[in-house]
């Protein structure tokens, strides 16, 4: 029950910012989607241009099927391979770093923990809270994408595939925000938490991006959650083990380790 | 004798090579106000943070009501005001108090509202917009609103004006009269001397003196200024029991008394005394004596 009270309070405090973030995601999604009919009209010219480029670039932009004018190629290269998960990470890493380490640094965690509530309940309430906010903005963006399938002419991608891509995006973001949360919970250091979560996100993106060009990184690409997310793309293949199962294999134990560590250490 | 509400046994807390608290024994009974005194850095806050389960002891043990301070059932009976009050700045006072009230099993809003009124605090204001003193009031209210059985107060009235300090002291005394045990940490003796039953003095993490206020007062030297209606005859105050220094200037006498003034009062009873002024700072001398030793040791 106390975890629910902590969760409810967090969501209450985040309502306004979640509305603003949701509005930003809607504007972003609509702005990109509205350009698709024009891109599709120029498909042959764009495909000819892309053929002249190294295949690695196509992979890096999530357009491994060879066309950035196809619905899958367009949405991967303009949305799922970059802007969407990066914005989710900006939102999520901030919340995850604040949930324990940020609150501890600003001094609000100690008075909260003086109440009859276990540390684990506070931690889990706030972890679930940040996941819910991320899920809400992901769901809203996915709903917008689904709503405009007909008007903007990308019905080749099914509703299920968009939902699968949305869930995979959420899990990709959660993987890095969970690392942020866990480092913050275990150390009480907000800077280390942000550096850890964002740093691993950037490092694994670099591995994924360079894997198409450099053999050394190609051998490492299995370590990159971005590779699990985009190869193969859920937009084309729907629910894939790599994009759903592998992130969960990381998220759950990392979250548990961070929480347990937090319950045992000294507050700073 | 009832079992202590606060029971600290051989508590030691180290941070790396620094020993913040060393083998500390301390117990507070129901209905007792214990003043934990010491200069900044003496280990008071570390002791309290161990007591509330924010820090893990390096050695020894702490317990509240005989249980683990982290147990929610134990915590439900605790009120705590931290030394460095930081409450969620973006929340309104009312929202924070209701949230904490929910965590404590549902404190009636009327109860919190009554405390706000008593401390003249507007609950509709955002905490971030409040002055330091008003934020302190919020901290005091959240600690008292659920009628705790133990109060742990770390520099609780810092930042409050004297009138409000007195109000808070009275509120704490009221709780104490209902059987609440109080551990009041301060680096200022005057903050606790009028309400504490016992005090402990911490120095460099060690409890170097623990005694009742009555004993400390008996030990304290008092400087009295006595104004008589007429000039005093020579030697009138010489040899009075308890007096250690006497200076007479016409009808005014400056007297230093060790402990009780009973003999002196009896001695001057037959003369017309117009005014007695007590310079009551000598109780503090005892503490300054310990603090001074610390500085010398450092």
Image: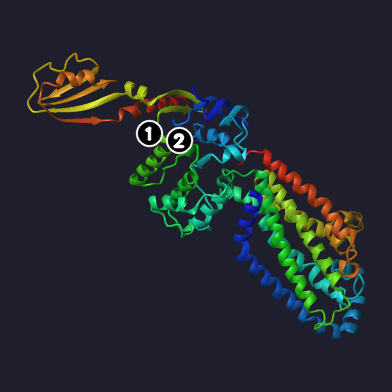
Q: How many marks?
A: 2
Q: Chain of mark 1?
A: B
Q: Mark 1 and mark 2: span between their CA atoms? A: 10 Å
- Kindly indicate the quadrant of the structure image that contains residue A26: bottom right
Q: Is residue A190 visible?
A: no
**Which residue lies most toward the top here?**
B239
Quick check: B174 above or below A41?
above
Q: Which mark is residue B47?
A: none
- The residue singled out by tag 1 in the image is B195
Quick check: A82 above or below B11?
below
Residue A117 placement, left or right of B197? right
Q: Residue at x 63, y 57 (%)?
A: A8
Earlier sequence position, callout 1 versus callout 2? 2
Quick check: A150 above or below B4?
below
Residue placed most toward the observer, A198 or A251: A251
Q: Is residue A156 visible?
A: yes
Is label 1 on the same chain as label 2? yes
Residue B237 placement, left or right of B74? left
Q: Residue at x 71, y 45 (%)?
A: A259
Q: Which mark is residue B184?
A: 2
Q: Mark 2 and mark 1 in contact (Cβ < 8 Å)?
A: yes
User: Residue A23's spot in the image, x, y percent?
Assistant: 67, 72
Question: Mark 1: which secondary structure?
Answer: loop
Q: Residue at x 49, y 47 (%)?
A: B142
């Amino acid at each position: 029950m106390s975890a629910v009270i902590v969760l409810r309070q967090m969501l209450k405090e985040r309502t306004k910012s979640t509305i603003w973030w949701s509005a930003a995601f809607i504007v972003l999604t609509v702005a990109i989607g509205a350009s698709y009919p024009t891109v599709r009209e120029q498909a042959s010219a764009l495909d000819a241009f892309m053929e002249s480029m190294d295949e690695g670039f196509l992979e890096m932009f999530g357009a491994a099927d060879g066309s950035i004018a196809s619905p899958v190629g367009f949405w991967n290269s303009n949305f799922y391979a970059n802007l969407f998960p990066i914005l989710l990470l900006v939102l999520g890493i901030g919340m995850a770093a604040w949930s324990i380490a940020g609150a501890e640094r600003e001094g609000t965690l100690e008075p909260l923990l003086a109440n009859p509530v276990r540390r684990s309940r506070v931690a889990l309430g706030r972890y679930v809270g940040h996941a819910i906010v991320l899920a809400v903005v992901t769901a809203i963006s996915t709903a917008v994408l689904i709503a405009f399938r007909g008007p903007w002419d990308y019905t080749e991608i099914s509703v299920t595939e968009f939902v699968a891509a949305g869930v995979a995006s959420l899990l990709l973001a959660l993987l890095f925000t969970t690392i942020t949360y866990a480092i913050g919970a275990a150390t009480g250091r907000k800077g280390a938490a942000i550096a850890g979560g964002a740093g691993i996100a950037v490092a694994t993106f670099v591995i994924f991006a360079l894997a198409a060009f450099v053999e050394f990184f190609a051998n490492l690409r299995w370590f990159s959650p971005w590779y699990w997310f985009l190869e193969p793309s859920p937009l084309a293949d729907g629910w894939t083990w790599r994009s759903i199962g592998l992130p969960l294999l990381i998220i759950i134990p990392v979250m548990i380790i961070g929480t347990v560590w937090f319950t045992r250490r000294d507050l700073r | 004798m009832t079992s202590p509400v606060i029971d600290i046994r051989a508590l030691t807390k180290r941070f790396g090579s620094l020993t913040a608290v060393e083998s500390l024994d301390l117990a507070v009974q129901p209905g007792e106000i214990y003043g934990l005194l010491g200069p900044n850095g003496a280990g008071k806050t570390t002791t309290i943070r161990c007591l509330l389960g924010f820090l893990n002891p390096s050695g020894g043990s702490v317990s509240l009501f005989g249980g683990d301070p982290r147990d929610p059932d134990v915590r439900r009976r605790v009120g705590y005001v931290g030394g460095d009050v930081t409450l969620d700045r973006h929340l309104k006072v009312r929202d924070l108090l209701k949230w904490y009230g929910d965590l404590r099993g549902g404190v009636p809003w009327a109860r919190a509202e009554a405390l706000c009124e008593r401390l003249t605090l507007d609950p509709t204001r955002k905490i971030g917009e409040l002055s330091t003193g008003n934020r302190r009031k919020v901290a005091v209210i959240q600690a008292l609103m659920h009628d705790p059985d133990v109060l742990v107060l770390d520099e609780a009235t810092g930042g409050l004006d004297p009138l409000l300090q007195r109000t808070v002291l009275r509120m704490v005394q009221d709780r104490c009269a209902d059987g609440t045990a109080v551990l009041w940490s301060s680096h200022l003796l005057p903050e606790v001397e009028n309400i504490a039953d016992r005090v402990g003095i911490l120095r460099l993490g060690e409890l170097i003196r623990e005694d009742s206020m009555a004993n400390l007062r008996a030990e304290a030297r008092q400087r009295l200024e006595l104004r008589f209606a007429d000039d005093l005859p020579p030697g009138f105050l010489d040899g009075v029991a308890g007096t250690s220094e006497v200076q007479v200037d016409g009808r005014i006498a400056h007297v230093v008394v060790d402990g009780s003034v009973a003999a002196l009062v009896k001695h001057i009873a037959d003369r017309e005394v117009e005014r007695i002024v007590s310079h009551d700072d000598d109780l503090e001398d005892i503490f300054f004596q310990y603090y001074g030793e610390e500085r010398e040791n450092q």
